[in-house]
């Protein structure tokens, strides 16, 4: 005789959101309940809404996570009139990559920057640490993979400092190293050739200050955009200086840049060591500076990992896949080197 066991029904719990506010509830649910559906897909739950009562069905763990994120997103609606799918994605990504303890501190962080585009707050412990160090130290390094917010947050801090009259100008600097295409083949004068390399910095400024305000500040040279080579010989006082893509500097260029900093200035150096466009075998100024400057008082280092990526979830997986391959290749090379050394040793012994 055989027996069959019926699958257990999913558990459910009801969450009551207070205060009951129709506009905030509409923001939480999203157009056509799109935000709730996004959470359902990601966490494998079912959410039924009636007024300010949300019934969540699923496994105990997924219910607990869903209740936590719904509560925090509802608190977010008090500050933001609408919750975009991008913001929902950031919360869900953080839940996936962080411990419960760290997640509870992220949305309610007291570190925030107010810009024309809205409030900017850290997403993750590393971003919060990065912002704090940019406030506390005059020189900071933000090192890690693409999509971790290194450049964006640095520009946000620069805009904040300018608006508070803590600095008189912002300088955005990049090494003009080609990623496969020569500058000479691009149309236009030098400024027009450099602009494509600085587009991410422009985009962040436009979002935070608006197109017209940025152009006015550029005309007045309150915001200055320049290739790294133009920094030589200058002393930069009362400025917020951002060196982006610093993995493409040489050690000599990095030293030159760091020694430009004058009184009342802050400098932030960002870079991704895994995306160097320098000629093969050429040492990176970013890697060199981390070795030389480690332990020096007044200089902050923030190291970002794949788990800190705040772009599309696939970006995090791509970064992790490349990291895993790099580690595998490094391990194979080390093994081959050790084997070759052992063979040489055996040959000398037999001889």
Image (tube, rainbow, N blue to C red):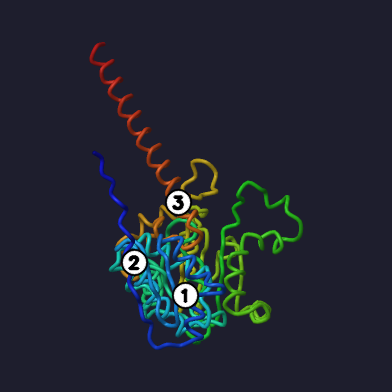
At x 52%, y 83%, the residue is: 81
Q: Secondary structure at mark 2?
A: helix
Q: Which mark is residue 63?
A: 2
Give the residue furthest to the right: 188
Residue 144 location in percent, x, y?
Answer: 43, 57
Q: Secondary structure at mark 1?
A: loop
Q: Are marks 3 and 1 in contact (CB under 8 Å)?
A: no
**On the image, numbered disc 1 is attached to which residue?**
262
Q: Nearer the viewer, mark 2 or mark 3?
A: 2
Q: What is the spatial separation of the Cα atoms under label 3 and label 1, in whole angstroms?
A: 41 Å
At x 61%, y 66%, the residue is: 226
Q: Camera-side residue: 122 or 337?
A: 122
Q: Nearer the viewer, mark 2 or mark 1?
A: 2
The crowding category of the residue bearing disc 1, from other C-alpha atoms within 10 Å (few below 14, some 14 to 19, many at least 20), is some
**On the image, numbered disc 3 is attached to which residue?**
317
Is residue 297 found left or right of 226 in the rendered image? left
Give the mark nearest the N terminus, 3 or 1. 1
Is residue 216 found left or right of 16 in the rendered image? right
The crowding category of the residue bearing disc 2, from other C-alpha atoms within 10 Å (few below 14, some 14 to 19, many at least 20), is many
- Picture quarter with the C terminus: top left
Q: What is the spatial separation of the Cα atoms under label 2 and label 1, in whole angstroms?
A: 54 Å
Q: Are marks 2 and 3 in contact (CB under 8 Å)?
A: no
Residue 236 vs 38, above or below: the answer is: below
């Amino acid at each position: 005789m055989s027996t069959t066991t019926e699958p257990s029904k999913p558990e459910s719990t009801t969450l009551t959101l207070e205060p009951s506010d129709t506009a905030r509830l509409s923001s939480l649910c999203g157009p056509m309940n799109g935000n709730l559906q996004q959470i359902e897909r990601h966490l494998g739950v079912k959410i039924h809404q009636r007024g300010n009562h949300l019934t969540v069905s699923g496994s105990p763990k997924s219910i607990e996570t869903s209740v936590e994120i719904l509560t925090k997103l509802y608190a977010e609606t008090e500050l933001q009139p609408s919750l975009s799918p991008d913001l929902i994605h950031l919360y869900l990504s953080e839940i996936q990559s962080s411990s419960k303890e760290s997640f509870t501190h992220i949305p309610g962080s007291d570190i925030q920057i107010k810009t024309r585009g809205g409030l900017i707050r850290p997403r993750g412990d590393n971003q919060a640490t990065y912002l704090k160090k940019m406030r506390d130290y005059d020189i900071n390094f933000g090192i890690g993979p693409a999509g971790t917010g290194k450049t964006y947050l640095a520009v946000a801090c620069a805009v904040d400092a300018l608006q508070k009259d803590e600095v008189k100008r912002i300088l955005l600097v990049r090494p003009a190293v080609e990623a496969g295409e020569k500058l000479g083949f691009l149309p236009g004068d030098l400024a027009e050739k450099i602009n494509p390399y600085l587009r991410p910095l422009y985009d962040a400024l436009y979002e935070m200050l608006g197109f017209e305000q940025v152009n006015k500040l550029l005309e007045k040279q309150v915001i200055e955009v320049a290739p790294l080579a133009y920094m030589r010989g200058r002393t930069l006082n009362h400025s917020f200086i951002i060196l982006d893509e610093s993995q493409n500097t040489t050690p000599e260029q990095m030293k030159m840049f760091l020694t430009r900093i004058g009184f009342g200035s802050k400098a932030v150096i960002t870079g991704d060591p895994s995306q160097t466009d320098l000629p093969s075998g050429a040492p990176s100024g970013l890697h060199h500076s981390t070795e030389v400057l480690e332990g020096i008082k007044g200089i902050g280092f923030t190291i970002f990992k794949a788990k800190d990526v705040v772009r599309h979830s696939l970006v995090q997986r791509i970064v992790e896949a490349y990291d895993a391959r790099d580690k595998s290749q490094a391990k194979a090379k080390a093994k081959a080197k050790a084997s070759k050394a052992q063979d040489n040793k055996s040959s000398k012994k037999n001889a």
